Image (cartoon, rainbow, N blue to C red):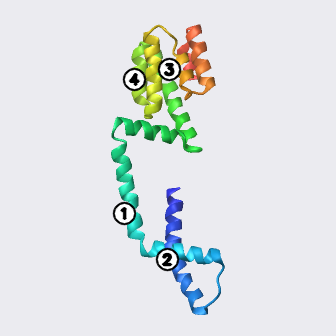
Amino acid sequence: GLASMGILFFLLSYVVPKVTRIFEERDAQLPTMTVVLLAISGFLSNYWWAILAVLLLGALGVRLYTRTPAGRLRFDGWVLRIPYFGKVLKKVALARFARTLSTLLLGGIPLLQALDIVRHVVSNMVLSNAIEDGRNSIREGHSVADPLRKSGLFPPLLVHMIAVGERSGELEQMLSR
């Protein structure tokens, strides 16, 4: 995506202005969309430095915002709602959650301690908080699956496999699947 934007910027700020000269020399009547494209191209070629400054300041602002706990939580929630990419990132994080928890449990780490470790492995704060809720639920004597189901973040299949693994005593094997 970033490469595509770079190519588009190059075309609009460098190539199109060169073609614009040809149109100006012929004094041709241009369609409205072409005039709009030429206006956008002129803006990009004249004010590229302002656009770059706004992008850099925006990136710096997002970086500073995500350093606060509330900002990080909101940003991570927003990331999960991005079309397509949010779903992919969520699946990657949940696969990491299941794989790491399975490995820790197979290694003999107690469930509460393993969940605490896994909570830090998952980089998304929203998912990490849901795992923490599951951990607290276990501490109070409840199952792991119920708070994960209630969070709405974990796919039903994963929650079902965790519930079956808890009931059968084979949580490690279910998570590794």
The three-letter code of the residue at mark 1 reads Ala
- Mark carried by residue 102: 3
Q: Could you tell me if residue 107 is visible in this image?
A: no
User: What is the x, y in percent for residue 34?
Assistant: 62, 77
Residue, disc 2: 42
Residue, disc 4: 117
Q: Could you tell me if residue 97 is visible in this image?
A: yes
Q: Name the residue rendered at 44%, 38% in the picture.
A: 74
Of badges 4 and 3, nearer the viewer stands 4
Q: Are marks 4 and 3 in contact (CB under 8 Å)?
A: no
- In this view, 76 is above or below 158: below
Dot 1 or dot 4: first in sequence order is: 1
Query: Which picture quadrant has residue 54?
Result: bottom left
Of badges 1 and 4, nearer the viewer stands 1
Q: Name the residue rendered at 55%, 11% in the picture.
A: 166
Circle 3 packing at 10 Å, graded few (<14), some (14-19), many (20+), is: many
Task: Judge left or right: residue 66 versus residue 12.
Answer: left
- Number of labelled discs? 4
The three-letter code of the residue at mark 2 reads Gly
- In this view, 128 is above or below 18: above
Compute the Cα span from label 3 to label 2. Answer: 57 Å
User: What is the x, y in percent for residue 93?
Assistant: 50, 33
- Mark carried by residue 53: 1
Circle 1 packing at 10 Å, graded few (<14), some (14-19), many (20+), is: few
- In this view, 15 is above or below 115: below
Circle 2 packing at 10 Å, graded few (<14), some (14-19), many (20+), is: some
